[in-house]
Amino acid sequence: MLSLLLPQLAATEDAAEKAAHISPWWYGGFALAVLVVMLLITLIMGKGRPHS
């Protein structure tokens, strides 16, 4: 099990080092944009009211 996790952990640490120059504001902005798009899709598909 540990032999499967160690390469993934090393790859994650490598990706984190490469992405260290990206501002945390970009991650927050992306998360907010995804949330807004999902909310819009929910409202459009459900016509703004719950299904029951």
Image (cartoon, rainbow, N blue to C red):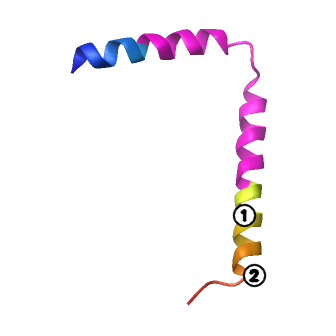
Badge 2 amino acid: Lys
Label 1: element kind: helix
Q: Which residue is mark 2?
A: 47
Above or below for 11 versus 52: above
Residue annotated with mark 1: 39
SS for dot 2: loop
Task: Left or right? Give the position of 37 relative to 19.
Answer: right
Q: Which residues are magenta?
A: 10-35
Mark 1 and mark 2: Cα distance apart in space: 11 Å
Residue 19 in the figure: left or right of residue 7: right
Give residue 14's position: percent from left, percent from top: 54, 9
Question: What is the quadrant of residue 20 in the picture?
Answer: top right
Q: Looking at the picture, tell me which residue is in the foreground, 36 or 44.
A: 44
Quadrant position of the N terminus in the picture: top left
Name which quarter of the figure residue 8 lies in: top left
- Amino acid at circle 1: Leu
Q: For residue 10, which numbered disc appears in the image?
A: none
The percent position of residue 34, horizontal first and vertical second, equals 72, 49
Residue at x-position 77% and y-position 73%: 44
**Residue shown at 71%/33% (left/top)?**
27
Local crowd size for mark 1, using a 10 Å CA cut-off: few (<14), some (14–19), many (≥20): few
Q: Is residue 38 magenta?
A: no
Q: Quadrant of residue 39?
A: bottom right
Q: Earlier in the sequence, mark 1 or mark 2?
A: 1
- Seen in the picture, residue 44 relative to 23 is either above or below; the reply is below
Total numbered labels placed on residues in the image: 2
